Image: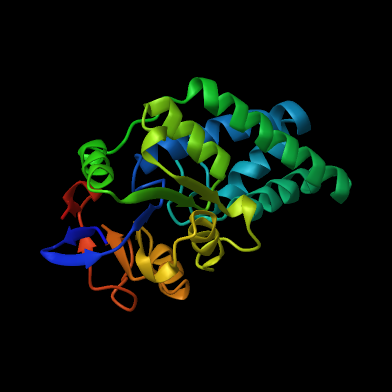
């Protein structure tokens, strides 16, 4: 079985799964772009009042598009995000079931805009690390609380989609992180036992999900909170994860 090294600790594994925002791509840049696309889509479909309510409920400053790192847009799984949007539209005096339809359509439109206008980039050093891991015989994947399809499109836009064997999003499973569902789904699609996989993420919920899934190890990348309950492996960047 291949080996990766984290903080001088060798870990035998056959699959390394990564979170997306804040781990592989710059979180602030992507969140601001996402906020703009979603707010504009809600505005088009449901009007200005709903757009302003959406911003408030999603943790977005409507005038600057700054995103609260503690809020739903930054933290919530996609399914919960859409419920927030539906609530904003409903508060604008739209029937709840119609509000849910409009919210789903707004997010679909935002995704389409993101695929053409958002210019993603990997965090410094990430591509070299990913290529080294791949070259050492490891399988790689992305498991995100966002959309698995969007994650694939982002990696395609960057030019590194071929490095990954699987993409799993919270929109494809019953529960997002900290539940283990998407990690187990990613392992299952590749036929890899969870005990042979490692998960790398920048949130405490990433580490919690990895432990709940029974993965061999979890690696915390500059976590905002205390991840010590779940892992002893904390790094500044995925660039410091070495093959062999």
- The quadrant of the picture occupied by the N terminus is bottom left
Residue at the image point whose x is 34% and y is 75% from the top: 230
Q: Position of residue 162 (x, y in %)?
A: 40, 34
Residue at the image point whose x is 29% and y is 73% from the top: 231
Is 75 on the left-hand or right-hand side of 124?
Answer: right
Is residue 70 among what the camera can see? yes
Nearer-the-camera pick, 83 or 241: 241
Total number of numbered discs in the rendering: 0
Nearer-the-camera pick, 215 or 212: 215
Quick one: which residue is furthest to the front in this view? 1
Is 137 on the left-hand or right-hand side of 117?
Answer: left
Is residue 94 among what the camera can see? no
Q: Position of residue 98 (x, y in %)?
A: 86, 43
Is 143 on the left-hand or right-hand side of 88?
Answer: left
Q: Position of residue 146 (x, y in %)?
A: 54, 47
Q: Position of residue 12 (x, y in %)?
A: 25, 65
Quick one: which residue is furthest to the left in this view? 8
Is 198 on the left-hand or right-hand side of 176?
Answer: left
Nearer-the-camera pick, 120 or 8: 8
Quick one: which residue is furthest to the top in this view? 116
Look at the picture and state if 36 lies above or below 164: above
Residue at the image point whose x is 34% and y is 31% from the top: 121
Coloring basis for residues: rainbow
Residue at the image point whose x is 54% and y is 28% from the top: 114
Nearer-the-camera pick, 199 or 49: 199
Q: Quadrant of residue 53?
A: top right
Look at the picture and state if 70 lies above or below 150: below
- The quadrant of the picture occupied by the C terminus is bottom left
């Amino acid at each position: 079985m291949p080996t990766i090294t984290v903080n001088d600790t060798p870990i035998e594994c056959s699959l390394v799964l990564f979170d997306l925002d804040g781990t592989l791509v710059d979180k602030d840049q992507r969140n601001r772009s996402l906020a703009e696309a979603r707010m504009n889509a809600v505005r088009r479909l449901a009007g200005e009042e709903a757009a302003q309510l959406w911003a408030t409920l999603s943790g977005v400053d409507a005038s600057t598009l700054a995103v609260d790192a503690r809020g739903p847009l930054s933290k919530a799984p996609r399914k919960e995000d859409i419920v927030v949007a539906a609530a904003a539209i409903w508060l604008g005096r739209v029937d709840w079931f119609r509000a849910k339809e409009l919210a789903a359509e707004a997010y679909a439109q935002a995704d389409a805009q993101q695929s053409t206008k958002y210019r993603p980039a990997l965090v410094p050093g990430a591509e070299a690390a990913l290529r080294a891991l791949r070259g050492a015989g490891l399988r790689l994947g992305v498991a995100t609380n966002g959309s698995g399809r969007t994650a694939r499109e982002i990696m395609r836009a960057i030019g590194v989609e071929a490095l990954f064997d699987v993409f799993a999003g919270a929109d494809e499973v019953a529960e997002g992180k900290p539940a283990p569902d998407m990690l187990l789904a990613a392992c299952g699609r590749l036929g890899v036992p969870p005990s042979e996989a490692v998960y790398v993420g920048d949130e405490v919920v990433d580490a919690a999900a990895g432990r709940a899934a029974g993965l061999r190890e979890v690696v915390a990348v500059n976590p905002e909170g205390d991840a010590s309950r779940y892992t002893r492996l904390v790094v500044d960047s995925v660039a410091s994860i070495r093959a062999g």
